[in-house]
Amino acid sequence: MRTLITSLALGLAVAMSPALGADAPAKKTSIGGKPSMAVGGRFHKVHEVQGKLDCKDCHRIVQKDILYLRKDDPMPPKMAEVGQADRKGCLTCHVPGYVPDGVRSYWGV
Amino acid sequence: MAKFGRLIDTKRCMGCRSCVAACATENHFTPDAQWNAMIEYEVGTYPEVSKIYNTMNCMHCEKPSCKAICDKIGVKAISKNEYGVVLIDYKKCIGCGYCAAVCPYGVPQLNAEVKPLYPGKGAQGMESIAFADRHPLHQKKPKTAEKCTFCWHKLEKAIKDGKADRIGKDQDYTPACDLVCPTQARWFGDISDPKSEISMRIKATNAVQLKKHFGNEPQVYYTLDKGAQS
């Protein structure tokens, strides 16, 4: 009987191992470089690569879709046109007590 | 210890921008890096419409996002002193612009170039003082973050002179923007003292902090006109 229980426990552990693996901490992505707000710089990398955000997730006032640009419009759209990110969107992740995959809160804490 | 704050009454403000001009002259901010900006917008529906004038300077938050991110990246150029004033050390600032990106109020400005106050008209006001002789907060550098300091150079003087009680009252010890308001829409003083004039006005006018949901706990309060956003 003891052998049967041990075998069952081992079998269960093996069967559960992929699920346990999925709960393991996400692999850290090196974003390197000195702090920079430039497109492709560290700030954008953190949010694009680690946060997996699209430009429009933050820059919600973007109206000019690349497909609707006219010949006189700058290519690609300049940041001046994109404008400031809507900071309300920041609070989607940056809230006290909510720390998804290494995102740190810096508001209200 | 006093904790300085400001009250802006949008019911009284008529959008004249005297406060903006006074700050520009006192602190030599240029259009690319405004320390005090006037935001105006319309509210209501025709025929009952009105205009809201809302000046935005640094909120000197209890929990400043700019300082948090600056500390986080190890630069530590932003500090909050014992009087509640948030200041940027230009010598430490690396010009990354993170503070400008995270401030919910859009306050810090990355000044790409320190331009003359009145181009082509020679040195004016503070510009005529030799760079080394200026207050550290006026020793501006290009590619450096700047913002409203609550005119710390004046508050510091009051504290050194032992006249902190005259802050918000005397010309030499009060922020330039608060001195010039022709409609008395701006008040400055110790918000930690419930008996101070500003504290009593905040209470009497039900003044509120803007964008409270960010949790920054600003030290600037607004008395909101009908329809004004908070």
Image: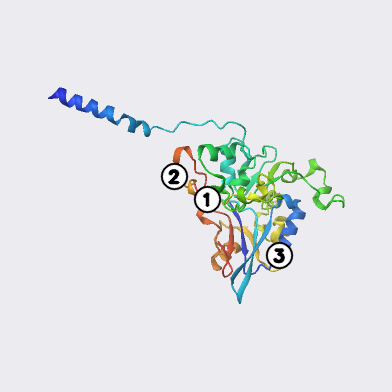
Tell me, yes or no, whether the two marked residues, 3 and 2, touch with CB atoms within 8 Å: no
Say what amino acid the circle numbered 1 marks. Gly
Secondary element under disc 2, as helix, strand or loop, is: loop
Front tag of 1 and 2: 1
Say what amino acid the circle numbered 3 marks. Cys
Q: CA distance from mark 1 to mark 2?
A: 14 Å
Q: Are marks 3 and 2 on the same chain?
A: no
- Protein chain holding label 1: A
Whole-percent x and y of residue A23? 37, 34
Of labels 1 and 2, earlier in sequence is 1
Residue wearing tag 1: A89
Residue wearing tag 2: A98
Residue wearing tag 3: B181
Q: Quadrant of residue B230?
A: bottom right
Q: Are marks 1 and 2 on the same chain?
A: yes
- Protein chain holding label 3: B
Secondary element under disc 1, as helix, strand or loop, is: helix
Q: Residue furthest left?
A: A1
Q: Residue furthest right?
A: B121
Front tag of 3 and 2: 2
Say what amino acid the circle numbered 2 marks. Tyr
Q: Residue furthest top?
A: A3
Q: CA distance from mark 3 to mark 2?
A: 43 Å
> Within 10 angstroms of label 3, few (less than 14), some, or many (20 or more) residues?
many
Secondary element under disc 3, as helix, strand or loop, is: loop
Question: In terms of depth relative to the viewer, which is nearer, B43 or B77?
Answer: B43
Residue at x 54%, y 40% (from the top left corner): A48
Whole-percent x and y of residue B201? 58, 66
